[in-house]
Amino acid sequence: MVTSKEMPKQVIFPKGEKIASDHFIGTAWLSMLVPDDGTYHCPIYNVTFEPGARNNWHKHPGGQILLVTGGRGYYQEEGKPAQLLSAGSVVTIPPQVKHWHGAAPDSWFVHIGITSNPGLGDAEWLKPVTDEEYAELN
Ligand code: MN
């Protein structure tokens, strides 16, 4: 029987490579689907989180869109309750809004990320989502 903790090899798009970053807790994988280039100006990437994995609080100068393709996870804006996400969820993240996204503690989680207005600059990375903050969701 497949449980939600078992990571699928692939959910629609390739899982890609393990993310080597200080801006994540736990293990996540990244596959660039459309590069940030001078023609489309629309980077699109697949991100896969193991159970409990999440990124730090951060901001995108030009905003970001998340399209969830599998598993269960969370999106939270500062000062607001976290939103539970599953396949089919769409999240629009306004420019400069402090937030994080990641898996639920008991499930892997996969989303496509689209960086809107990429010319406005790269994400600004902030503090980790502490175990205490993360535990409050559950
Ligand atoms: Mn983000």
Image: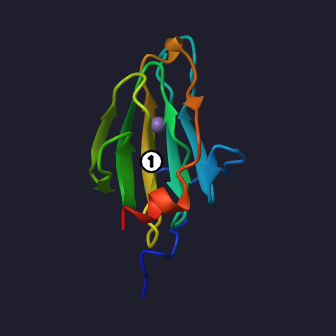
Instruction: Tell me if residue 14 comes above or below residue 120 in the rendering.
Output: below
Left or right of 25? Residue 95 is: left
Query: Residue 59 in the image: x percent, y percent?
Result: 48, 29
Q: Tell me how the rendering is colored.
A: rainbow
Query: Residue 48 in the image: x percent, y percent?
Result: 52, 54
The residue labelled by disc 1 is: 101
| Residue at 64% across, 43% down | 23
Please name whichever residue, 91 or 25, is drawn nearer the observer in this view of the structure: 25
In terms of secondary structure, where does tag 1 sit? strand
Query: Residue 64 in the image: x percent, y percent?
Result: 41, 30
| Residue at 51% across, 27% down | 43
Q: Visible in this render: residue 16?
A: no
What amino acid type should be assigned to the residue bearing mark 1?
His
Instruction: Tell me if residue 32 comes above or below residue 26 in the rendering.
Output: above
The quadrant of the image that shows the N terminus is bottom left
Query: Residue 104 in the image: x percent, y percent?
Result: 42, 64
Please name whichever residue, 76 or 80, is drawn nearer the observer in this view of the structure: 80
Left or right of 138? Residue 113 is: right
Q: Visible in this render: residue 126?
A: yes
- Callout 1 environment at 10 Å: few (<14), some (14 to 19), or many (20+)? many
Please name whichever residue, 62 or 137, is drawn nearer the observer in this view of the structure: 137
How many labels, in total? 1
| Residue at 50% across, 45% down | 46
The quadrant of the image that shows the C terminus is bottom left
Left or right of 75? Residue 89 is: left
Disc 1 CB within 8 Å of nearest ligand 1 atom: yes
Instruction: Tell me if residue 131 comes above or below residue 81 in the rendering.
Output: below
